[in-house]
Image: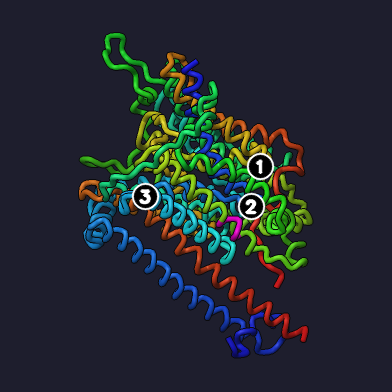
Amino acid sequence: MDDVALILDSAARLSALLLFAALGELVAERAGTLNISVEAMLLGSAFSGALGSWLAGSALAGLATAILCGLLIASVQALLSHRLAVDQFITGLSLNLLALGVTSFLFASFDMDSESMGTFRVPLLADLPLVGDALFDQSWLFYLLYPLVPCTWWLLYRTRWGLQVRSVGENPESCEVTGIDVKKRRRQAISWCGLMCGLGGAYLSVGLIGSFTPNMTAGRGFIAIAAVIFGRWTIRGTVAACIVFGGTDALRLALPALGFELTPQLLIAAPYLLALVAMLLIRPGRQGPAALGRGYTEFA
Amino acid sequence: MSAAADVAPVDEATPGDSGALARRARWSDAGLFAVLLALALLLALALASALLAVADASPATVFDAIIDGSLGSAPALATTLNHTSLILVVAAGTCIAFRAGMVNIGQEGQLSIGGLTATAVALGLPFAGPWAVVIILLAGAAGGAIWAVAPAFLRFRRGVSEVVTTLLLNFVAFQAVSYAVNQPRLLQEDVRADSVTAPSPQSNRLPDDDMLPALSSGTGYRLHVGIVIAVVLALAVGFLIRRTTLGFRLRVFGFNPRAARRLDVKPGVMGGGALIASAAFAGLAGAVLLTGVTMRLQGGFSSGVYGSFSNNFGWEGLVVALVATYDPVYAIPVGFLFGALRAGSGALTATGISPTIAAVVQALVLIAVTVPALLIVQRRRRREVQALRRERI
């Protein structure tokens, strides 16, 4: 029983990290950007969160620097891919390379001693059996997700901005004729992704671990992309996918310690395989936003 | 932007001296491009230096060490050329895919699977020697190609973006390699029964006769023929793309698939074929890495790129193809530059500087090279739009 609660606890932490990144990535993808620099945003803000909390001596400062770094990387991606029309994958690729290089390099040059964010135990709710610890005894940042999920939904489906973002990802040509600034909406969607990844990075380095290690995201940004795909580009699906993928990650980490033999490779590859299978099964023509991954040049 | 010359290129269709004006505008574009490129590269260099300064390292020392470690001695040059060969093979293949409009970003995985199949074939062959090497290289290419069949199928039968599938299959490939070298019944090395150490996550060593022949070797270095293979392949692909009908059809398909249909180009065959061919090149690079350098398959237990068998060569090949604007002939010098950067940064460890600075420089160079070309394109486009507006008025 205790083991189950423990695994659930670890699954909740890992899912939360994925969810921060995936909520951002979802909005960026709905606007038409297959934003592979989500990995760079996560890693960069994890590092700058640790750096900020070390320099200022407070976890909150770390959160602020992490968000700033997420937004900075997002603005570079947005500037290059939706102002200068550099191919978005080239941009993402170079940003991933850059983030990995810069953070590993700076990490090797500093001797950081980062702060860690405290946890908060929600009274009463945390005493629920099994899921209490997992859902209501976590780092402060974790609780942001409870409002953030409905917020993202509201933003995407109940605001004019969200409607325009979704349209821009489906049919940018019509949007331009209607008078929507296609590239601007896409840049804004990427900024939202940067903000979310800033929170996610801070959650990882300052909230969960309290320090930075090189390549500490270990491809979680890519798993977030897989989660958005597996979730068929909807909020509900994305949340479910993050929980499933976080859960498999937690199982992979926990099962050997509990004495189970397993092939970790299959569990590591599971999110990617599931996303691929999902794409194989979805009806053609409903493969996500129609303009996903295509750059856009205005008529005039 | 005021003079009439600025709008001249649009009037190319009209007879008279506008041709000369257009030519002059093109030349001014080329000049501006050179200036912008130089500025961008300088900015990239300045940023890298600033980063080094933050880490209390002298940029001059670091750049000296990189040059010394990549070109300064025979072993250094051999390492550079060995790196170059892998990067260039991947880059040449990548050019095929991108010219056909296929965004293949799965080189890391295709290279790993190429290494995997090459190892399996090499250890299974009953003989060793030059013919075995040929078979192993082909097996690597076949392995890489197989890894792109699913993306090609999904792209042309189900309409799934090949970007996503090739990207995701990278991580599946790393785990496939890791699985193979962790399972004794698959490729994990055999240890003697009396050995006290557990078997490592790596395959048996290939027979010595399966080593890629050396062009030159000495104490501490061995330059294999990979670089010859790579340059020949790059030139061949360059010829194919520029000078043959197939290459023409490939480029048309990449520019405008709808127009290509008029040439009777079948999207699945051309696009899928280009994707699979590019993956075969990456797989071949995996086999070259195996027979030229490592001589055994190693698979880290990581979910990231570092620590995998492909060891970042796939990404670097992709980056080189991008920097070389998908032209395999340009990829030869660019590939050499990146090979040298990699060899030189490997030598940095001795100076106490983290070799990760190489990734930073590569990324900055990539951005610095792509941006100026686009600025030019945008400027030209803006001028065209202005001219169109003027006509309408």
The quadrant in which residue A178 appears is bottom right
Question: Label 1 vs label 3: CA separation?
Answer: 31 Å
Residue position for label 3: A103
Residue neighbourhood size for the residue with mark 1, other residues' Cα within 10 Å, grouped as few (<14), some (14–19), many (≥20): many
Compare residues B103 and B207 and report the one nearer the observer: B103
Discs 2 and 3 carry the same chain letter: yes
Compare residues B249 and B51 and report the one nearer the observer: B51
Residue at the location (58% across, 30% down)? A244
Residue position for label 1: A235
Chain of the residue that carries numbered disc 1 in the rendered image: A
Q: Secondary structure at mark 2?
A: loop
Left or right? Give the position of A141 relative to A104: right
Is residue B342 in sight in this rendering? no
- Of badges 1 and 3, nearer the viewer stands 1
Residue at the location (64% across, 35% down)? B150
Residue B40 image offset from top left, x and y in percent: 42, 68
Write the start and end of the magenta stretch as one range. Answer: A187-191
Residue A293, label in figure: 2
Name the amino acid type tagged 1: Ile
Residue at the location (56% across, 45% down)? B278
Q: Is residue A189 magenta?
A: yes
Q: Secondary structure at mark 3?
A: helix
Residue A65 image offset from top left, x and y in percent: 41, 54
Q: Earlier in the sequence, mark 2 or mark 1?
A: 1
Residue B252 image offset from top left, x and y in percent: 68, 58
